[in-house]
Image (cartoon, rainbow, N blue to C red):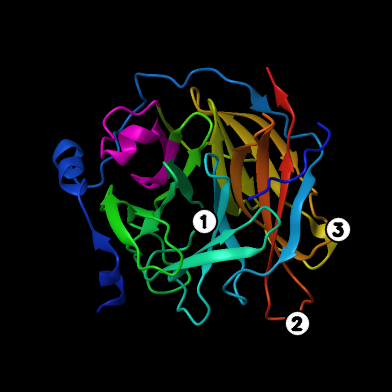
Amino acid sequence: MSEPRSRPMLSRRSILRAGGGCAATAALLGTGGLLAGPAAATVPTSQYFDITKPSYDLFRSKMLHESHHAMQGFAFDNVNHRLFIAQIQNGSSGDDLCVNQVDFSGNRIGSMHLPGAGHGVSIGVEAVGTDSYIWMECDSNSTGDDGRGTALARFKFVNGGTPSVRKFLTGSKTITCATDPVHKRIAVRRNEGGRLHYSVYSLAAAAAGDFSAPLAHFPQPALSGSSVTFQGYTIYGNHLYTLDGTGHADPADINSYVTRIDMNTGTVKSRFLTKAGKSLIYREPEGMAVYRTSGGETRLFLGFASRSSMSSADRYANIFYKNVLVG
């Protein structure tokens, strides 16, 4: 797959088959898994993205497998140069998900379906040789659009195949994840004691079912704004990036913000209104990811859903990126 041009700076749930790894995780951590309290270790200091810099197009107005649903979370396999995007299935009650594989121009290559998974706000990808393993929520707590995962799923992406899933951190509430493909880490976001928390792990340890040594563990900090609608997150080095905002018919109503958080302190370092794709019709922020090109340029990606018109049932995927690292 070619890379984008470089620019200037059954029950339906029974289909998801639980495999090995869960018993060991449960025995080690107990139901739900994540440790409480701050982590003893820290995430090594890294460069960070200047979120105030301009954004560039990866692609615009691409229809995914499920034509009537917006894109949700997305992630890159940095080794095999693949891009995967989650969305709700057409005709679903709201918690059945589709994972699309697209090329870097947004053209569909393949897809897999996961019934009863959740909402797909954020996903991760792990490269294993020439294979791509998807990390995402599963075992939704509701069959409606408000359904959210109660466990993490890991499965090999096979176009048109039925996922054979290993489940981790079962018994969680509102759990999602994101991966750092450069530093090979995974962040887990979930509700703990009534408040959302993030925990960061070595991706290799997580794949082995070991969630005993988080590199960071902190509550989600409060974000400024009268009404913050969370739409996705990703990690790079010791920084976590979030995207929030809502869809809008009028470009003057843009309210989508990118936020940078230091994962070692859990504090907000920068927050910026992004107008990437501001001309899109009913532009709604959806998902974030990181990718490093073969030329060595590291990029922070922002996703937005759109429509051809306000009355159209069709939905389109749009992805932009920032490429200025500091430090």
Q: Position of residue 11 (x, y in %)?
A: 26, 77
Is 22 or 228 nearer to us in this picture?
Answer: 22
The residue tagged with tag 2: helix, strand or loop?
loop
Is 110 or 225 nearer to us in this picture?
Answer: 110
Q: Earlier in the sequence, mark 1 or mark 3?
A: 1
* Mark 1: amino acid: Val
Q: Are circles 2 and 1 on residues that touch, CB within 8 Å?
A: no
Distance of label 2 from label 1 (alpha carbons): 24 Å
Q: Alpha-carbon neighbours of circle 3 within 10 Å: few (<14), some, or many (≥20)?
A: few
Give the tally of numbered discs. Answer: 3
Whether 201 is among the magenta residues is yes
Is the residue 165 above or below the residue 128 in the image? below
Which residue is under mark 2?
Answer: 311
Q: Alpha-carbon neighbours of circle 2 within 10 Å: few (<14), some, or many (≥20)?
A: few
User: Which stretch did the figure color magenta?
Assistant: 186-215
Which residue is under mark 1?
Answer: 121
- Which of the 4 quarters of the picture holds residue 143? bottom left
Which residue is under mark 3?
Answer: 252
Q: Alpha-carbon neighbours of circle 1 within 10 Å: few (<14), some, or many (≥20)?
A: many
**Could you tell whether 206 is left or right of 251 in the image?**
left
**Could you tell whether 127 is left or right of 327 in the image?**
left
Distance of label 2 from label 3 (alpha carbons): 19 Å
